[in-house]
Structures are given as structure tokens and as C-alpha cells.
Image (spheres, rainbow, N blue to C red):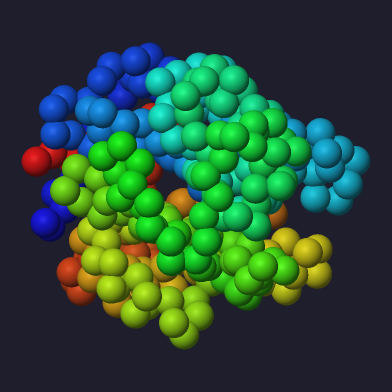
Amino acid sequence: MAATLTVRRNVLSLRDTLTVAPAEGEVQIHWLGQSGFVIRTTRETLVIDPYLSDSLEKEHQGEELGHERMMPPPVCADDLRGVDFLFATHDHADHLDAESVGVILRNNPTCRLVCPASTAGTAEDRGADPARILAMRDFEKITLGGLEVEMLPSAHEEITRDENGVTMFAGFVVGLGGRRLYHSGDCVPFPELPAMVAERHPNIVLLPVNGRDAFRASHDILGNFTVTEAADLALLVGADYLVPHHFGLFDFNTVPPDQIVRELEPYRQKGLEYILLDVTDTIVATP
């Protein structure tokens, strides 16, 4: 099914917006900043990679790269209720944040944490009950309520595996509401990726666009797709929409929104639509 998406500017705060259930058949996508999203159908709510604290600023206080937030969290972790599934693509603290994960799981007692098996131990250390962790392996498929989920390997900036051969950095393909969504987690291009994703036929791809450079590499900051690399992948896999993310949070690891727009505009002529979200927006996919 080809995706048809609209963007709605929220009148209410995100906290209050999330108390209003989607209409029957709708899929709603809310950006939490960085790589974080809330994705809702009429029956399920999933949260991916929420970083809703200033834990990294506290950890790196006084260092050259202080990790001060450029934007406040659009919602408090304590306000995320009714969450069925919490996804973590890997164990970096801006994706698996102890101050967010522990709160969400405590307030949502039936919520399960979905993550690579390589990340499960860190998830336990950061507040997840091991009985509530769904630890996945590469190319494993599971059904979660009305969702079909498959985990794919990602390269950040290379494919890295644990002692059991499970990727350390993952992406997820989620089938929901008659559509298929791909969130790559942190990732750069690698030869197998386009065919691997194309075989899953995603309509919507959520890809990081903050890029990588020598300065960040010298400070052990792993990089991601550039804007054009993300757009090229979206075209290659046949997606209808690209939703860029992983920008606007840390001043040393971002790309200006006007640059994202400038570099993505030519791709409209190639048949790729993109949506550059603000945290006050909601993407709505209707039947």
C-alpha cells in the first residue's frame, strides 16, 4: 500500500496530544528529538529510542563536548503512559537512556522492551526487568499484538557483533496499519543494506542525517548517514517518504534544518517525498 501522509501541527502539548487516541485506522508518528519517536495505532503504542533527560549533560559536565541539549524534551518520560512496546536500537545513552527507560517501564507495567540481544545486559543495568525484555537476533521476526517486527543489522560506522554474533547496532522494520516502517537506528551505508531493506518493502523510512567527519571521529563520536546518503537509500528501497532525524540535539553532532531541506528538495523530482518534523508536529497516515 502506498503511503499517504499528512502533517498536523499540534494545538496541544505533546503530553496532552498523546492522551487523544488516533482515529480508527490511523497511524500517528510523533518525533521526540534525536532518534526518538512515538508511533501509535488505535490499538498499540510503541516508543523508539527515547532520550528525554539530560543524563548525558550530567555525565560529560566540564568536558570539551558537554552534551548540553539544544532543545528541551518535548514530553517528560513520566508522561508517557499506555506504552505497549519500548524499542532500543542499541545501547548508546541517547538511544537507551536510563533516566527514560526506567521511568517508562515503571509507569507501564505491561510494556515490553524490544532490543538486540547484544543490548539486553545494558538494558537490565539501566532499569529493565529481564523478564520484560524481548531480546532479538539478526533477521528474527516476531509478532507484537497487531505489529509485525523484524530486526536488521546496522553499521555505526561499521557492523559490530557481540560474542554470540548478534549485531550491536540494529534497525527495525515494523508492519502496522497496512504500512511498513523502517527505523535504521544509527547507521551508515554498507553494501548489503539497500537490497536488505528493499526486500522488506517499507513505505516510510526514518533515517539519521547528521553525517560524520574527522572532528567527531577524533572524539570517538560515531557517525551516521549524510542527508544525501539517507535520501539515496530511501530511493533505492522504494520508500514513499523519508523522515530525517538525529539532528538538533547536540551542537557538535547535528546538521542545520535548512541544509537538510536544501539537500532533499532535488529528490522530490526523483519521486521521493520527505517530511522534516518539528516536535510540535504529528505525521498522520490515514487508510
Taking the image as drawn, is residue 240 in sight? Answer: yes
Q: Position of residue 185 (x, y in %)?
A: 51, 57
Work out which residue is located at the far right of the displayed protein and give it.
Answer: 62
Point out the image quarter for the N terminus: bottom left
Q: Is residue 45 left or right of residue 88?
A: left
Q: Is residue 235 left or right of residue 216?
A: left
230 or 203, nearer to the observer: 203
- Residue at position x 43%, y 26% from top? 83
Q: Position of residue 68 (x, y in %)?
A: 72, 38
Q: Is residue 276 left or right of residue 259?
A: left
In the displayed structure, 222 sits above or below 41; it is below
- Residue at position x 57%, y 55% from top? 116
- Residue at position x 28%, y 17% from top? 20
- Residue at position x 26%, y 28% from top? 43
Q: Quadrant of residue 105?
A: top right
Point out the image quarter for the C terminus: top left
